[in-house]
Image (cartoon, rainbow, N blue to C red):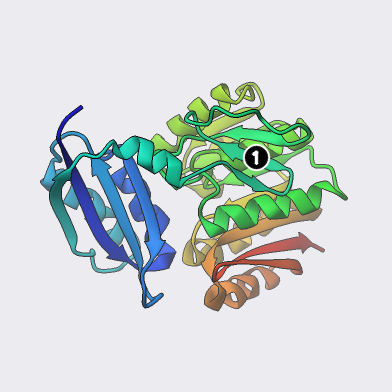
Amino acid sequence: MSDTLWRVDLAVTPELAEAYEFALEDFCEAVTQYLDDDELAQRIEAYSENPIDEAALLASVKAVADRNGVEAPDVKISEVENKDWLAEYARSYPPLQIGRYFIYGSHFDGTLPAGKIALKVEAATAFGTGEHASTNGCLQALDRLSKRYRFNQPLDMGCGSAILAMAIAKTWGAPVIASDIDAQSVDVARYNAEVNGVGSYILPVCGDGYRTPSVSRNGPYDLIMANILARPLSSMAKDLAKHLQPGGFAVLAGFLDRDANWVFAAHRCHGLRLVERIKVDGWQTLILRKG
């Protein structure tokens, strides 16, 4: 084990934290985030066992900023002493139980709880592991919907790690289209689906939202999950409504409390009504229904 680690530190707006976090995965083995003391910024820390290509990392961070029309955050790269960081990191992220779902990583050596739906997602990053409030809210929404409804034609838009697509597949035994604009996310989704034994149920596809051929061809859907960001969610509201069956449900997340009404208003204009709000640590998940 090397005596040195390379650490990356940056502070970003909470709405874009997951996007920046995901960008750092190409360069670092462990990425995590936490709310700054003033609760106005999300701090991201990432660690690598190997020297980091600083120019490439800064370009990746700038690409996220450019896509979202904001200024790139300051990035600090430093060397730190290696103290068996992976073991410490794993201890910092114990298994989670959210409703009927039990989320764990490969470091978990306990017994899977009976009667729970187990989802294995690595703890090398908090992205898509259930640690983030928006993912937590989405899993709560699925747990609540599962008590009253059955879905046969679901879509996970912006699938990331595919944790939500896997939860859907294991809950209802339904085939799921798992779409993401990022090719790396699609590869991760495919890998996680295979590890969790639902590879035959999940079709990971890469493309631009509802214009992706596999997405437009397989609709309309009775359930659409979209854990993205407030701005793209609002701009995609018309397309979501078009691809959602009458009576179908949409679960929207990835935005702070202050943006929830804005996101809902964009969808209400296209015939969706509010069923429930789920609030977790300043973030909201909306359950909407068409018609």
Residue 19 occupies quadrant:
bottom left
Give the position of the C terminus as an image quadrant. bottom right
Above or below: residue 154 compared with residue 78 = above
Above or below: residue 273 compared with residue 252 = below
Residue nearest the observer in this picture, 244 or 155 = 155
The answer to whether residue 236 shows anywhere in this view is yes
Residue 33: horizontal and vertical position, in percent?
38, 56
Give the residue number, with chain letter if any, for mark 1. Answer: 102
Amino acid type, callout 1: Phe
Residue 3: horizontal and vertical position, in percent?
14, 34
Give the position of the N terminus as an image quadrant. top left
Residue 268: horizontal and vertical position, in percent?
70, 72
Position of residue 67 in the picture relative to residue 208 (left or right): left
Position of residue 208 in the picture relative to residue 172 (left or right): left
Residue nearest the observer in this picture, 24 or 266 = 24
Residue 197 occupies quadrant:
top right
Residue 117: horizontal and vertical position, in percent?
71, 35
Above or below: residue 224 compared with residue 282 = above
Residue found farthest to the right? 148
Residue drawn where x is 39% and y is 35% of the image? 184
Per the image, label 1 sits on a secondary structure element best described as strand
The answer to whether residue 217 shows anywhere in this view is no
Residue drawn where x is 74% and y is 36% of the image? 116
Above or below: residue 110 compared with residue 284 = above
Query: What is the tally of numbered marks visible in this picture?
Result: 1
